[in-house]
């Protein structure tokens, strides 16, 4: 064996040992590809066993095939790149809308500044109107209290007047009863007077008759005494 052959043999031996060490480190300390695969929930990983086993990754929505490889890490990296690309596209879309939104916000701020001043003036005006309305309400409330007190006084006076009316009616009824009794007594007295006057008239007639008889000629003294006694 020549010296060159020995040197090549030693180099191959060291290269083999180094490759074995690299493979061992990668297996032990490298990424956990199974965990990485499970974390990508937006993708479907399919394993095709056989003489030439392969891994395939597809998007869960739409079923778009992204990569096929016998190495799981390669299809996972492809899925991660696809996801990163989509995120970058969304970021670009959002970034593009920032400037127009800033301009829109500035315009609205300028418009709102004018509106805020007008709204503050309107709010001040409305507050003044509210204060006036509150004053009117308080005034009406006080007037209502006064009216209520006057109503109570009027009701009390009306009650007293009604009591006076009832008392006067009772007095009128008593006066009517007394008048009726007086009229009855007056009638009774008038009847009594009429009877007395009738008796007086009869006596007067008798007296006149006696006087005529007494004064008539041809009657003696004894007969006159007897007629006068009658």
Image (tube, rainbow, N blue to C red):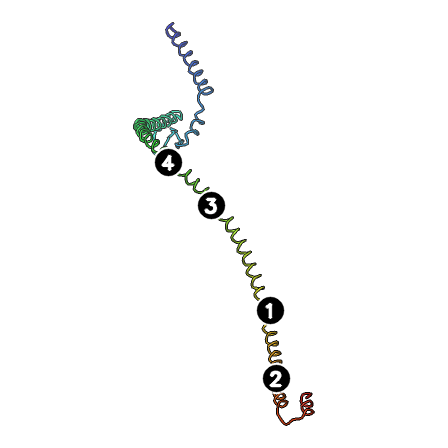
Kindly identify which numbered label has been placed on residue 204: 2
Q: Quadrant of the C terminus?
A: bottom right
Kindly identify which numbered label has been placed on residue 125: 4
- Given residues 111 and 28, the one toward you in this image is 111
Q: Secondary structure at mark 4?
A: helix
Tell me whether circle 1 and circle 2 mark residues in contact (CB < 8 Å): no
Q: Residue furthest bottom?
A: 218
- Given residues 218 and 30, the one toward you in this image is 218
Label 1 vs 4, first from the N-terminus: 4
Q: Place residue 82 in its image quadrant.
A: top left
Q: Nearer the viewer, mark 3 or mark 1?
A: 1
What is the distance, in whole Å, between disc 4 and disc 2 at their CAs? 111 Å
Label 3 vs 1, first from the N-terminus: 3
Q: Which residue sits at x=44%, y=40%?
A: 135
What is the distance, in whole Å, between disc 1 and disc 2 at their CAs? 37 Å
Kindly identify which numbered label has been placed on residue 178: 1
Residue 107: % across, % down: 30, 29
Label 1 vs 2, first from the N-terminus: 1
Mark 1: few, some, or many residues within 10 Å (few <14, many ≥20)?
few
């Amino acid at each position: 064996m020549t010296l060159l052959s020995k040197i090549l043999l030693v180099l191959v031996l060291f290269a083999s040992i180094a490759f074995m060490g690299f493979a061992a480190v990668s297996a032990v300390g490298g990424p956990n590809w199974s965990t990485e695969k499970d974390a990508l929930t937006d993708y479907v990983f399919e394993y095709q066993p056989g003489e030439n086993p392969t891994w395939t990754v597809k998007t869960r929505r739409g079923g778009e095939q992204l990569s096929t490889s016998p190495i799981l890490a390669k299809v996972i990296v492809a899925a991660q790149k696809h996801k990163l690309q989509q995120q970058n596209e969304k970021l670009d879309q959002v970034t593009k809308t920032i400037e127009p939104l800033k301009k829109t916000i500035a315009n609205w701020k300028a418009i709102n500044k004018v509106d805020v001043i007008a709204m503050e003036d309107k709010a001040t005006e409305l507050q003044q109107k509210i204060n006036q309305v509150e004053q009117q309400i308080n005034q009406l409330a006080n007037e209502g209290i006064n009216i209520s007190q006057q109503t109570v006084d009027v009701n009390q006076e009306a009650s007293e007047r009604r009591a006076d009316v009832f008392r006067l009616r009772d007095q009128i009824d008593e006066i009517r009863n007394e008048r009726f009794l007086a009229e009855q007594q007056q009638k009774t007295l008038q009847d009594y007077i009429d009877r007395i006057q009738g008796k007086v008239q009869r006596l007067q007639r008798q007296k006149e008759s006696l006087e005529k008889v007494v004064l008539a000629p041809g009657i003696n003294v004894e007969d006159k005494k007897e007629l006068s006694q009658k």
